[in-house]
Amino acid sequence: MTAQLTDVLEMVRSFVAKGYDCEYRVKDGDLVDLKLGSTLDLCTLSVDAALRLESGSDAEDASNIYAISDPATGHKGLMIDAFDVFDEICHRNLSERLIAHRKTAPAGDQNVPSKFGLRKVYTEEFDGDAERYVLRESFPDGPACPFGGAFSILGFDTAEQSYVWRVTSIIRDSRVIRIPYQGEGVISDE
């Protein structure tokens, strides 16, 4: 199943059609079932499929999709790592479990200038003016996430005053300026 599907949205739709309709997220290093608000037991959960989709030169942009079953609840769901950061924020045992059998495939957006409707900013452009491209965290005015809900972090071009998709390698760059949302009337990107 994994080798033929090279688009994140296509992959999500495929898993949802197979009954993976719960959403899992990493909170405080643990895997949480958002529907129940409970932490999954690492010893009993099953990682049914794991796929890393890479694009850009040197795989500078990647997303991960994990199809997970929880026998304790009977739930099946997805954990979508659109920014390729979960293995850094999970507890080590969870990270190892998630990536143990992860397959890698080229994404279908290799030469596409946008992702999820947002203009892509690659490393070369970021290097030209690193302060221009900030990372907004939990801002309510961002575009809708195609997987439902909202993006928790998203790039923002301060010159054009628009949201952008920063390739995932930039998110780890030490020059990244992170701006957490602080409530209405306290927005500062400069």
Image (cartoon, grey):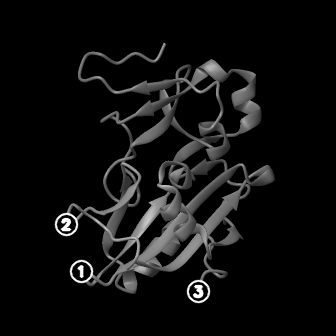
Q: Is residue 51 above or below residue 58?
A: below
Seen in the image, is 77 located left or right of residue 104?
Answer: left
Q: Secondary structure at mark 2?
A: loop
Q: Amino acid at mark 1?
A: Thr
The residue drawn where x is 26% and y is 81% is 72
Estimate the x, y position of residue 173 in percent, counting from the top left. 66, 33
The residue drawn where x is 33% and y is 58% is 148
In depth, the one of 45 and 115 nearer the eye is 45
For the residues labelled 3 and 1, say whether their Cβ atoms are less than 8 Å apart: no
**Residue designated by label 1:** 73
Q: Amino acid at mark 2?
A: Leu
In depth, the one of 163 and 100 nearer the eye is 100
Measure the alpha-carbon separation of dots 1 and 2.
9 Å
Residue 53 visible (yes or no):
yes
Measure the alpha-carbon separation of dots 3 and 1.
25 Å
Estimate the x, y position of residue 128 in percent, counting from the top left. 75, 23
Label 1: how many residues lie within 10 Å, few (<14), some (14-19) or many (20+)? few
Q: Nearer the viewer, mark 3 or mark 1?
A: 1
In depth, the one of 144 and 138 nearer the eye is 138
Quadrant in which residue 32 is drawn: bottom left
**Residue designated by label 2:** 36
For the residues labelled 1 and 2, say whether their Cβ atoms are less than 8 Å apart: yes
Mark nearer the N terminus (3 vs 1): 3
Mark nearer the N terminus (3 vs 2): 3
Q: Nearer the viewer, mark 3 or mark 2?
A: 2
